Structure formats: structure tokens, C-alpha cells
Amino acid sequence: MLIIDVKDGESIDKALKRYKRKFQNAGIMRELRTRKEFTKPSVKRRNEILKAQYKEQIRREEEV
């Protein structure tokens, strides 16, 4: 659980902004999305390989 201490004289908007930044840096939403459904390790690895191939192809096209 994220805890944000609101300092004396600090506006709620500033505290909310700090909370949002802390929330994003903690990676809570990313973790929730990955836990939503199970993906087999072989499927994860295949997706990583396909992503790497795609990035390499884009990089090669930019060089030409």
C-alpha cells in the first residue's frame, strides 16, 4: 500500500501528483495486468524473440 504524507500547507493537487508518480514507479498496474492471466514460459519466450526480431528489422530499415 502506498502512503503519501501531506505536509503542512501543501495543496492536495501536489500530493495527488506525488501519489500518481509513486504509483506508476511502483509498477502496480503492470503487475496486475501480468497476473490477470497466466502465460506459459514458452509463450513468453516466443513473444520476446518475435519482439526482438521486429525491433531489429525496424533498425535495419532505418539504416538503409
Image (cartoon, rainbow, N blue to C red):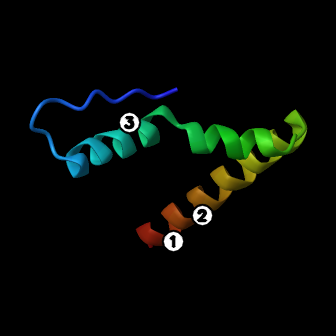
Name the residue carrying label 3: 22
Residue identifier under label 1:
61
Q: Is residue 64 above or below residue 59?
A: below
Along the viewing direction, whichever of 11 and 62 lies nearer the viewer: 11
- Of all residues shown, which one is farthest toward the left? 9
Query: Do tag 1 and tag 2 residues touch (Cβ < 8 Å)?
Result: yes
Image coordinates of residue 50 in percent, x first then y, are 74, 54
CA separation, marks 1 and 2?
Answer: 6 Å
Say which of 32 and 19 sits in front.
19
> Quadrant of the image for the C terminus?
bottom left
Residue 31 position in % (x across, y down): 65, 37
Q: Secondary structure at mark 1?
A: helix
Q: Nearer the viewer, mark 2 or mark 3?
A: 3
- Label whose residue precedes the other's in the sequence (2 or 3): 3
- Tag 3: amino acid: Lys
Residue type indicated by callout 2: Gln
Task: Give x and y (percent) for residue 7.
Answer: 17, 29
Q: Are marks 2 and 3 in contact (CB under 8 Å)?
A: no
Name the residue nearer the viewer: 47 or 15: 15
Q: Residues within 10 Å of mark 1 (few under 14, many from 20)?
A: few
Mark 3 or mark 1, whichever is nearer to me = 3
What residue is at 67 percent from the left and 54 percent from the top?
A: 51
Q: Which mark is residue 57?
A: 2
Crowding at dot 3, Cα within 10 Å, few <14 / some 14-19 / many 20+, comes out as some
